Amino acid sequence: MTSSQAGTTAQKLMFERNGWVLNNPRLPVLIYPGAIAVQGDDPAALFEQTFKANGWPPQWRYGVYDYHHYHTEGHEVLGVASGHARLMLGGPDGHVLQVRAGDVLLLPAGTGHCNLDSSDDFLVVGAYPPGQHADICREAPSPAQLQSIETLPFPDQDPVQGTYGAVSEYWSKG
C-alpha cells in the first residue's frame, strides 16, 4: 500500500431497493476519491497492481455500461484509470456521481450502476474477489439471485487499503 492509498478516506453510500434494482440492503457502496495517483504511460496498470496486491485479481479494462445493471455473483471494484464520467448508482433515478481518473468505487453485489455520460478517454479497471465475477442483471432478481447476494463471501481485504481498510470498517458480516 502506498502512502496515498493509506491516506485515502472512503466515503460510503447506502441504497435501498429501487424498483427492480435490489441494491444491497446490508453493505454500503464505498467511494475512494483520488485513491490512486494516475501517472505514466499505462495508468490502468497502477490500479491492477493495487487491486492484485490486495487480493482482488483484475478482470477487465473497459468503461461502465450505459444501461442500468447490477451483479449477483460478485462484489465489484472499479478503478478510473483515465477520463471522467457521470455515473448513476442505485438504479433508475438514483444517485448521480461524478468520477475522474484516480477514483475507485467498491460496489457490493446487487448495487445498480449505469454510465450517464463520459469523456472519450474514460477507462475503468474492474476486479472481483477470487472466485467471484460479474453477471449482468437487468431485471428484478430471482429467488436464486437474492440467495446468491445474501451468501456471497466477503472479501478478505479492501481492494485499495488492504487488510485494515474501509471494507473491514464498513462491511459487517452480521
Image (tube, helix red, strand yellow):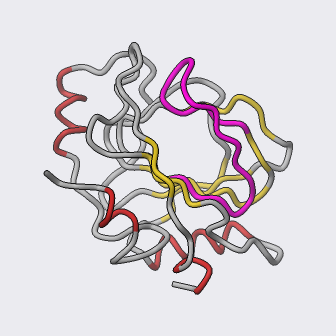
Image coords of residue 89 (percent x, y): 54, 33
Left or right: 72, with 143 as reference point: right
- In the image, residue 152 sits, relative to residue 18, either above or below, namely below
- In the image, residue 43 sits, relative to residue 19, either above or below, namely below
Q: Write the residue at 70% across / 43% down.
A: 98
Residue situated furthest right in the rendering: 120
Q: Is residue 97 magenta?
A: yes
Q: Write the residue at 58% across / 58% down.
A: 104
Image coords of residue 97 (percent x, y): 64, 39
The answer to which quarter of the image holds residue 70 is top left
- In the image, residue 14 sits, relative to residue 127, either above or below, namely above
Residue situated furthest top in the rendering: 19
Total numbered circles: 0
Left or right: 25, with 46 as reference point: left
The answer to which quarter of the image holds residue 44 is bottom right
The answer to which quarter of the image holds residue 102 is bottom right
- In the image, residue 164 sits, relative to residue 147, either above or below, namely below
Residue situated furthest left in the rendering: 174
Q: Is residue 138 magenta?
A: no
Q: Write the residue at 52% across / 80% down.
A: 6
Front residue of 144/114: it is: 114
Image coords of residue 107 (percent x, y): 44, 46
Q: Write the residue at 42% across / 43% down.
A: 134
Segment tinted magenta in the rendering: 86-105
Image coords of residue 67 (percent x, y): 60, 24
Q: Main secondary structure of the magenta part?
A: strand
